[in-house]
Image: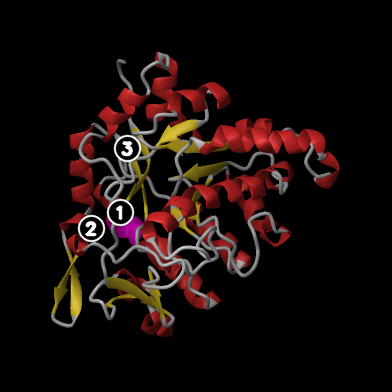
Amino acid sequence: MDNEQVIDCDGHLVEPHDLWERYIEGALRAKAPRLVKDRNGDTRIALEGRLYPQPEGYGKGFPGLPEAWYRPAGNGFQSTDIVLPQSRLKAMDREGIDIAVPFPTLGLYTVDARDPDLNIAICRAYNNWLYEEYLAADRRRLIGVGMVSLLDVGAAVEELRRAVTTLGFKGVYLRPNPVAGRALHDPAHDPFWAEAERLGVPVMLHEGTDGQLPTAGLDRYDNFFMTHMISHPFEQMLAALSMIAGGVVERFPRLKIAFLESGCGWLPFWLHRMHEHFEKRPHEVPWLKTDPIACFRRQCMISCDPDEVTIPEVVRFIGEDYVCWASDYPHWDAIYPGAVAELRRHMQGLGESAQRKILGDNARRFLNL
């Protein structure tokens, strides 16, 4: 396909270990997230007296942050080359990726700060660092998506507005998990959805597996194989239920939502099940006037993994305009090198138009690039 553009709509950056210590201002700097060694010698994030990922017990997360990302230096840590944006750009060149949308790694956990002032300070610090240091390496190829949390909805609205209008980001990222006992469809969040709709930028939902935020299935297992299997797709399924059946996209019909890093194979089953319930029990969701499948097509996007065997079936069900792809680079389950080649192999059988859209056109349209 001539003149195609390849866009990775969900890879990851690795934050420097001292990001928050450098970028949080004032007295809150003393409470900044820090890397520590737990009693087993694994590297974790210390935040408000908790360790992330959770080291033990039901819902425990990843056994520890990869040592390849940070090296001990005296009593602290030093970052390795993988934290540099130049490292990411080289990897993109090797893969044949034109544009990448980097999401956080440590920031998947730090959004769980329970102190509202610290929570927004953590988000602001990350966004400032992302703009000033990381994206500055190549603002044409690295696209900014800001970090926000719904703990304080008013603060989230302000940071969303700042991220888009001042920093020029193309969207914002949220964890899909309940926050302060509120699911995504809670009316308390409506000012945030209204502002995202007004600004015309997507809200990108991205799960983590940490065992501290309420997360599907993490009350049953203490094995990362199992907790990770559940957390990403199940939390996105619940998020889709909240956003669609919970009435958010009905109340805000121009709001754009992306479901990331959960695979795409669950989508046909889940949307069809929602459609069936909408047909047979509409009296229990009187606010929902539009069929759930039509809601998704009107406002949503889902990312696929490069090696998903179900990509053609998902496209045949939902259509070729609603699937983008994500590398997850450089996390443990990413394919590198060879992600784009693997994606092409699993798109065989789809037409040229669908392949071009999944490779980049859908992401470019959705993000207004």
Residue toward you, 47 or 253: 47
Tag 2: amino acid:
Val
Instruction: Decide: few, some or many residues near mark 2? Use Cα within 10 Å; few <14, some 14-19, many ≥20.
Output: some
Q: CA distance from mark 2 to mark 1?
A: 7 Å
Callout 3: helix, strand or loop?
strand
Q: Is residue 238 above or below residue 126?
A: above
- Is label 3 in contact with label 1 (beta carbons under 8 Å)? no
Q: Which mark is residue 99?
A: 3
Q: Residue at (69%, 39%) from the top-left corner?
A: 253
Q: Which mark is residue 13?
A: 1
Going from N to C along the chain, the mark reached first, 3 or 1, is 1
Q: CA distance from mark 3 to mark 1?
A: 14 Å
User: Which scheme is used to colour this image of the protein?
Assistant: secondary structure
The residue stretch that appears in magenta:
129-133
Tag 3: amino acid:
Ile
Residue toward you, 59 or 198: 59
Going from N to C along the chain, the mark reached first, 3 or 2, is 2
Helix, strand or loop for the magenta stretch, by majority: helix
Going from N to C along the chain, the mark reached first, 2 or 1, is 1
Image spot of residue 226 (x, y percent): 42, 55
Q: Is residue 184 above or below residue 19?
A: above
Q: Can you tell which of label 3 and label 2 is closer to the viewer?
A: 2
Q: Which residue is mark 2?
A: 83
Figure quadrant of the N terminus: top left
Image spot of residue 72 (x, y percent): 16, 74
Image spot of residue 337 (x, y percent): 20, 38
Query: Is residue 368 a member of the stretch shown in magenta?
Result: no
